[in-house]
Amino acid sequence: MIGMQKLHSLNAMRVIAEFIIVSNHVTDLGAKNLIPHSYGVTVPLMSFFFVLSGFVAMHSTDGFDKTYFVRRMRKTYPFFLLTWVAGFPKAVVDILNDNICLPQVWCNLFLQPLCLSNFTGWGIGGSNMPSWYYTALVSLWLCFSHVDVKRWVQDYPLTWMAFLYLTSLLVCVPFFYFDAEVVKILPFLRIFEFFMGCCAAVSFRRDGKVRGEICFALFLGYLVFIVMTVIYPKIWSRDIKADQCAYWKHDQEFTFQPSGLFTASSIAWALIIHWLAKAEVSGDTGLLMRMLQLDIFKSMSNFSLQLYLSHHVTSSWLDHSMQAMGIASWFTKEFHMVYVYATSYALYAHVQPRLDSYFNPVLEQKSAPSL
């Protein structure tokens, strides 16, 4: 980090969360064994990513930094663009075969490399579906590079965190009318979580305190939420009866569902991140901290990001190839997952270095940390 201590515990949390998300996507566990749209696991974890990204941005720059956006784009955009190119032929084939919603789908497909597809309100048509998270982050990085967040929140960071959290929940309520899969990708709704991470970083730098018991209770609440989604899946489900070709897919009936508050877990993640960072810096040697500082997490730091950005493309190509050859039934989900991991690692080990050498001939020693 730029003049800052690297926090290995947070890096390990990010690696673990990315592997959970990828495994959930590849094995389709979220759609079949939990609840619709994987609300029970993936939505709270995606909130964690946005909060952590805000924390990293503030902690690595210690405030206003107009170069942050450029540095992050130089580090991450080449590989993101590569995944779009790799997935483009398969996306075109799918669009032509489906023959539905053509204007919207084509629009979304070509807006994706410009990182603008999140604003269309259209949830399909991209060549790399999980990249909605990356394209949302691009907007947040740009905002962070031009807004002096630290000056606003430095006097009362935890108070601002609470204000941002309550505001995010209030803003979510009007969007219950729309398909959550469309709403969750909007950057102007995710900015609250990102700035909450910034507040956590400011409080951390000011030697603010967060009690570990509170963080444990909040994390326990997240586990209870997951258990509830398994036992009572219909409680959280939302039936989408809208026209599938509408840009903003609209529910016919307004139903207040807790799962629609996709920022609900953000306050828990912000406090947990704050607590972990403080515990690591203070030299905590507890079992949790020792586990999070294992070398395996340090070595997988960059690979986990490449895995997240590429897993949909590699998985889609494998599915398409097996279906075309009529051998899809020969392979298990376990084989599918091993293939995705191995292919992503090959891209990370052999393609990523070439992209770095071409786009970043002299990598900055003070480069920003990974997502």
Image (cartoon, grey):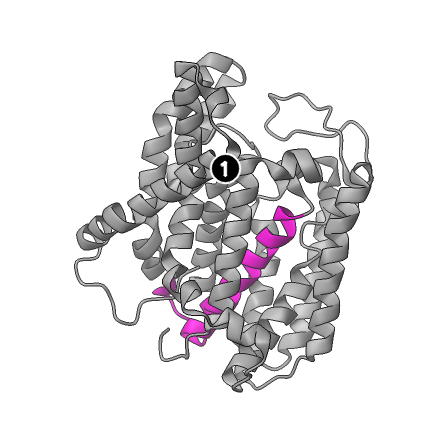
In the rendered image, the quadrant that contains the N terminus is bottom left
Residue that label 1 marks = 334
Q: What's the residue type where badge 1 is placed?
A: Glu
Q: Closest to the observer: 186 or 152? A: 186
- Please say if 341 is above or below 104: below
Q: Closest to the observer: 138 or 18? A: 18
- Please say if 79 is above or below 167: above
Quarter of image, res 273: bottom right
Name the spot of residue 101 as percent of width and height, x first. 54, 18
Quarter of image, res 181: top right
- In this picture, which residue range is highlighted in magenta? 41-68
326 horizontally vs 159: left or right? left
Write the residue at 54% across / 39% down.
25
Name the spot of residue 315 as percent of width and height, x first. 44, 33
Write the residue at 55% across / 37% down.
27
Identify the secondary structure beneath mark 1.
helix
174 horizontally vs 317: left or right? right
Q: Mark 1: few, some, or many residues within 10 Å (few <14, many ≥20)?
A: few
Q: Main secondary structure of the magenta part?
A: helix
- Using the rendered image of the protein, determine whether residue 179 is visible from the camera's viewpoint: no
Q: Closest to the observer: 342 or 253? A: 342
Name the spot of residue 222 as percent of width and height, x first. 72, 58
Write the residue at 45% across / 70% down.
294
Q: Closest to the observer: 310 or 249? A: 310
- Using the rendered image of the protein, determine whether residue 62 is visible from the camera's viewpoint: yes
Quarter of image, res 66: bottom left
Asked whether residue 354 is drawn in magenta, I would say no
Asked whether residue 46 is drawn in magenta, I would say yes
